[in-house]
Structures are given as structure tokens and as C-alpha cells.
């Protein structure tokens, strides 16, 4: 059933396509090049392809809140939504982390850990569904997703705008302030990725035994 929450989820999948195509066809800067430039002198204008990818990602991230909220509030939870919502989240996050690893902003092994956790949880949920049970998302998973989205957005802002952000916000992109901001999101989401993955394993150990 294609109700409003499911339509928003479908739009998020479209934003993933826009995000991927923008980065594939456009010329994107490398993290090392951005850091080596003088503040305010990195670009004469923002990087168009990364700007498109950034705003597509932000729209997708915001829609992640609204589709779930509307579905619960107005009783529009459907099987299609249960399938598409986590699928859209995982595709969006995995695509962003793969890209950020390719430009040197995220260690490759961190991306592998994050993708492994997503496949693990998806597998456990499928096994539970086959038994007619649900392995619902918990608060750890929601915080993990929030930090992952925060890290991806911080990195994309850095690559898109570099030193061209307004002066009060420039510290979020370049220099020590930007490094600390991205490090907080990265290691925070990695910690919660491992923790929540272990938590799902404990909750779903009965399915693995069977």
C-alpha cells in the first residue's frame, strides 16, 4: 500500500540515486586537498556535484524521521513500509561511507564494520520474520543511525564548501574544530555500531541456535 509514509520512504530511495549519480558524474575534491588549502581560499565557489549530493543526503536523512513518525502517529504502518524503511536507511548510509572511504575521510575498515553490522542485523530480522516474530529496532540503533548521519553530513559539508562557509561556521569544516567534530561523530557511531550489533546478536541468539 503506497500511503504517505511509504511515499516519503520511496522518495528517500530516489535521493540515494541522486546522491550516487551526483558523486559519480561530478568532479569531487579529495579530503587531503581541502585540508592543504588556506582557509577561505580552497574554492572560488562550492563544489557543485558534492553540494547536490549533500542536499540529497540531508533530505533523505530528514525524511527518515518523518516517515516513521507519520506511520506510527496515524496508524499507517504497512508491510511494505517495514521492508522499504530499513532498506532505504542502509543503502543511504552504506553508499555514503563507501564514498567517504574513497576520498580518504573514513578508514576503510570502519566502513567494512558498519556494512557488516547492517547485513548481520538484516539477516537476524529475516530469520525472526520467518518465525513470525519481529526483531524491532532499539534506542542504541537509533542513536547509531543519528551519529552515522551526522558524520556523513559533516564530511560532505567539508568537501562541498571547504573554507567557503560563513565565518561563524567555518570551524565546522576546516581546521581543528572540523577535525574534532568529524572525529566525534565517526568514533561515536563506530562504538554504537559495534555495541548495538552485539546487542542484536544477544537478542537474536535463539534464532541462530534454531
Image: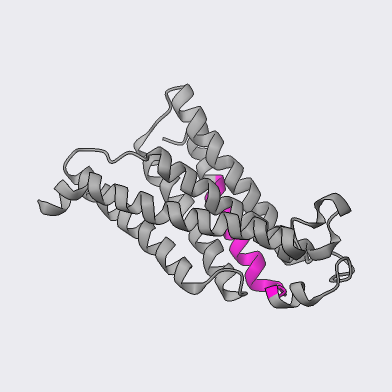
Percent of width and height locating residue 101 = 55, 72
Work out which residue is located at the far left of the displayed protein and give it.
Answer: 210
Tell me, yes or no, whether the highlighted magenta stretch contains residue 37. no
Percent of width and height locating residue 42 = 84, 71
In the displayed structure image, the side of residue 73 where residue 34 appears, left or right? right
**In this view, 80 is above or below 76:** below
Percent of width and height locating residue 181 = 66, 55
Tell me, yes or no, whether the highlighted magenta stretch contains residue 21. yes
What span is colored magenta in the figure? Answer: 11-31
Work out which residue is located at the far top of the displayed protein and give it.
Answer: 74
The colour scheme used to paint the residues is: one colour
Q: Nearer the viewer, residue 47 or 113?
A: 113
Q: How many marks are shown on the rendered structure?
A: 0
Q: Residue at x 46, y 29 (%)?
A: 71
Q: Which residue is drawn at 51% across and 35% down?
A: 67
Percent of width and height locating residue 112 = 42, 68
**Of helix, strand and loop, which mostly describes the magenta segment?**
helix
Q: Residue at x 42, y 54 (%)?
A: 193
In the displayed structure image, the side of residue 14 where residue 140 appears, left or right? left
Q: Which of 93 and 147 is in front in this view?
A: 147
**In this view, 20 is above or below 197:** below
Q: Nearer the viewer, residue 50 or 1?
A: 50
Q: Residue at x 26, y 38 (%)?
A: 134
User: Is residue 46 visible to us here?
Assistant: no
Looking at the figure, which quarter contains the N terminus?
Answer: top left
User: Is residue 55 visible to us here?
Assistant: yes
Amino acid at each position: 500500500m503506497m500511503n504517505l509514509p511509504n511515499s516519503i520512504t520511496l522518495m528517500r530511495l530516489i535521493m540515494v540515486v541522486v546522491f550516487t549519480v551526483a558523486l559519480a558524474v561530478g568532479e569531487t575534491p579529495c579530503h587531503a586537498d581541502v585540508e592543504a588549502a588556506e582557509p577561505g581560499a580552497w574554492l572560488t565557489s562550492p563544489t557543485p556535484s558534492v553540494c547536490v549530493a549533500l542536499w540529497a543526503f540531508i533530505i533523505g536523512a530528514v525524511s527518515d524521521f518523518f516517515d516513521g513518525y507519520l506511520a506510527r502517529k496515524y496508524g499507517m504502518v504497512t508491510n511494505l513500509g517495514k521492508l522499504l524503511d530499513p532498506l532505504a536507511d542502509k543503502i543511504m548510509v552504506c553508499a555514503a561511507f563507501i564514498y567517504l572511504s574513497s576520498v580518504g575521510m573514513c578508514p576503510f575498515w570502519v566502513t567494512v564494520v558498519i556494512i557488516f553490522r547492517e547485513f548481520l542485523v538484516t539477516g537476524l530480522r529475516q530469520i525472526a520474520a520467518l518465525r513470525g516474530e519481529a526483531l524491532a529496532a532499539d534506542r542504541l540503533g537509533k542513536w547509531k543511525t543519528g551519529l552515522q548521519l551526522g558524520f556523513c553530513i559533516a564530511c560532505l559539508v567539508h568537501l562541498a564548501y571547504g573554507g567557503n562557509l560563513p565565518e561563524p561556521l567555518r570551524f565546522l569544516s576546516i581546521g581543528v574544530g572540523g577535525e574534532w567534530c568529524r572525529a566525534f561523530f565517526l568514533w561515536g557511531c563506530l562504538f554504537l555500531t559495534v555495541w548495538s550489533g552485539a546487542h542484536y546478536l544477544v537478542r537474536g541468539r535463539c534464532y541462530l541456535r534454531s
